[in-house]
Amino acid sequence: MSENLVALFQNIGLTEQKAKETAKNKNLAPTLERVINTAGFQNKPSEKSTGALLYHLASTSTPAAAPHLDYIAEAIRDSKLTTSDQVAAAIKFVSNKTNIDEAAFNEECGVGVIVTKDDVKKAVDSYTETVKDKLIKDRYKYFGLFFAGAKNIPSLKWANGGDIKEAVDAKMLEVLGPKDERDVVVKKKKETKPEVKEEVKVDVLKVPDMFFEGELAKLHKPGENPQINPELMKEHLKATGGKYITRFPPEPNGFLHIGHAKAININFGLAAAHNGICNLRYDDTNPEAEEERYFESILEIVKWLGFTPSEVTYSSTHFQRLYDLAVELIKKDKAYVCHCTGEEIQKHRGGPERGPRTACVHRDRPIKESLELFEKMKSGGFEEGEAILRMKMDLESGNPQFWDLVAYRVLKTAHHRTGSEWVIYPTYDYTHCLVDSFENITHSLCTVEFTQSRPSYYWLCDALEVYKPVQWEYGRLNITNTVLSKRKIAELVKKGYVFDWDDPRLFTLPAIRRRGVPPQAINNFIHTLGVTKSDTVIEVTKLDAFIRDYLNETAPRLMGVFDPIKVVIENLPEGFEQMLTVPNKPRDPSMGERTIPFTREVWIDGSDFREVDDKHFFRLAPGKTVGLLNVPYPITCTKVVKNNAGKVVELVVRYENVDGFKPPKTYIQWVAESPKHGSPVRLDEVRLFERLFNHANPQDKREVPGGYLSDINPNSLKIEKGALIEVGLWDIMDRWIKSSESKTDFEAMRFQLIRIGYFCVDRESDLGDLKAGSGASVKDKVKKIVLNKTVGLQVSSTLKNKE
């Protein structure tokens, strides 16, 4: 990561953290660097709004628009494009064009178009006449459709969204008057036509027993959770039909890890167990930390684990509604605008000494004043850190989650979905329960660190008189010999201890996937743990056992050698070739068969030969006999050939193809030399992984006083080059090319290398043209093969002693 890039990105208003993250993004960084340089902000800062638009351009541009990015960047610099909508229109306009017609560009992108508040008012007045009957009938519950319709008025295409909202509010007040008892209940999204959503699809063998026993068996049924107003439950049940509705709500600011696999299984599994639905919801309220790659990875991982969300939703979809409810909270005197710094807030909460808690000077400011200041926050009248909106809760409570939590803060960073429309963003404490309410969640499941947040979750729902889901907590899942903290993993990546977030030595789910771990093994592992209120720390060896058990049943067997020694069978003729049919898995006909060549020259592994024999060594040595797996007769070593350096480079053996020869004690794997069959398959790299950390808990200061970075195992990665493998690999690759839809799930090519371990193909491999039916086998197209070790074999102590 270049320090110059970080500095350049800070010139357009990115924080240092965001700039560093962006500089490491191989896709985004070059594009952003290009548009900044084009706009002329190499050595000087831009206006924050301009910088936000340049970032929006770089992060949302398409390959079809790439030739004309400079043109758009200059238009942003010259203030021709001033909104994210205009930038989006520009990207669309220039796509696939050779030359740009300036007049057409200006017209299509609204360059120079000024829509005044008066223009907006007139357009909204006119539009109201077309929907007036519906407005009068549905009153304030019609706001969402009314506002959406107003935004789609052609003459308002380039109008300020805030101006449209203001005109809509004013018109509704004019036509309907103030809200009254008919408008008390806060209606749900799409409440007039309850959705019949797709039920949760779980591609696992069955719904596990854990959802019908223990803690999960005690959960309430939909409709049993009390509400501050009984009408809220009636509306909820009308919208849901009494279904169980859960959600998995990750923040898109990093990659999921093994602990999230438990959360995914519990949320999707509980819904499936009761024929309900589960949404994937992105809690995207912190644009500084969010990146498109995280959104994509999260959905991909959920599907990889075998779950299909009923709906993919975003907290940002509700920004306007969340803002409106914040205004309501202020009107109820349950929120106020505060100007305290973080240090001042900490002091009022009693400070490190845990002294008495006191209200700040802003807590009792007039409602009208807070409303005006909150509007000023929304309009960009405050810089970051100058004003926040806090909920007026209970400073005397013993629960810190009642100490006037922050609901909104100023953050002048472009959002991946809403662009630069908002300069204030809601916090997790404010957003989470309300979006659960909007989505009619019946069971809001989370880990135990949120137990203290449950009362404040309920407080906010009741304060605003919206439907209140039930929050229920379960214990976190932790694994030994690793770290799961995003900050710590980021440090490992930054300092080069691991390749990236999907390095197979990590326990992020992309890393586990890349290592070749089948998702079914992960799910089986989670199901055996059950669900309790206690955090669990599981030995990594237990997870390995589940992976090994699953692969033992499903992975085909191949032969391979990491340290090849050439073997010449002296009593077989030149050009000898015998095709052997061998099972893909011994004693399991359902796994099928493969055909491999047996020839005069074969390769064995260096570990299976000793020049000086030993009575405890049962493999090949001078004068000694050993069997070759699946070959009819054994071989006996008759001669050892060395190079000038004294290294063994070839063994001459005799094929004991006579009846009555005594079977050998040991059989070893081998690979034939047969170019016409593409044998051997030559591997570019085999990556052998061990534990990344030496101690079970590398974060324990007592065991690791030097910190987790001092506990890194220097031998956690060994790379073997020059390894050989049999032709059965070509069959596996050909089957994968025909069956894989994405052609990116290389790790699905899994197999056991006999006597070595379980392996998969790494995504850095280059298999050439991956189109099925292209007329040539993969062996004729492959350019690079890299394997990752998934897990070792569980070898008995007896076998270890023999070897």
Image (tube, grey):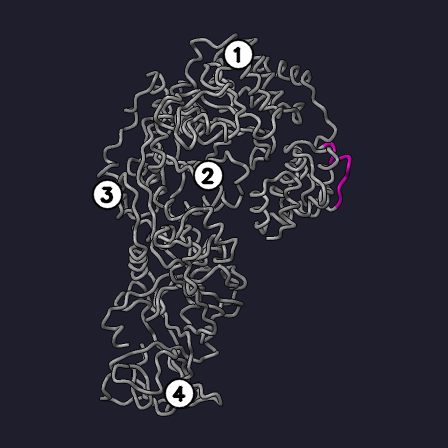
* Foreground: disc 1 or disc 2: 2
Q: Is residue 729 above or below residue 634?
A: above
- Residue drawn 50% across the image and 33% down it: 285
Read off the residue under disc 1: 133
- The answer to which image quadrant residue 459 occupies is top left
Stretch in magenta: 99-107
| Mark positioned earlier in the residue sequence (2 or 4) | 2
Q: Secondary structure at mark 3?
A: helix
Q: Secondary structure at mark 2?
A: loop
> Circles 1 and 2: CB distance less than 8 Å?
no
Q: Main SS of the magenta segment?
A: helix
Read off the residue under disc 3: 209
Read off the residue under disc 2: 251
Between the C-alphas of marks 1 and 2, the distance is 41 Å
* Foreground: disc 2 or disc 4: 2
State the count of labels. Answer: 4
Say what amino acid the circle numbered 4 marks.
Leu
Give the number of the disc on residue 651: 4
| Mark positioned earlier in the residue sequence (1 or 2) | 1
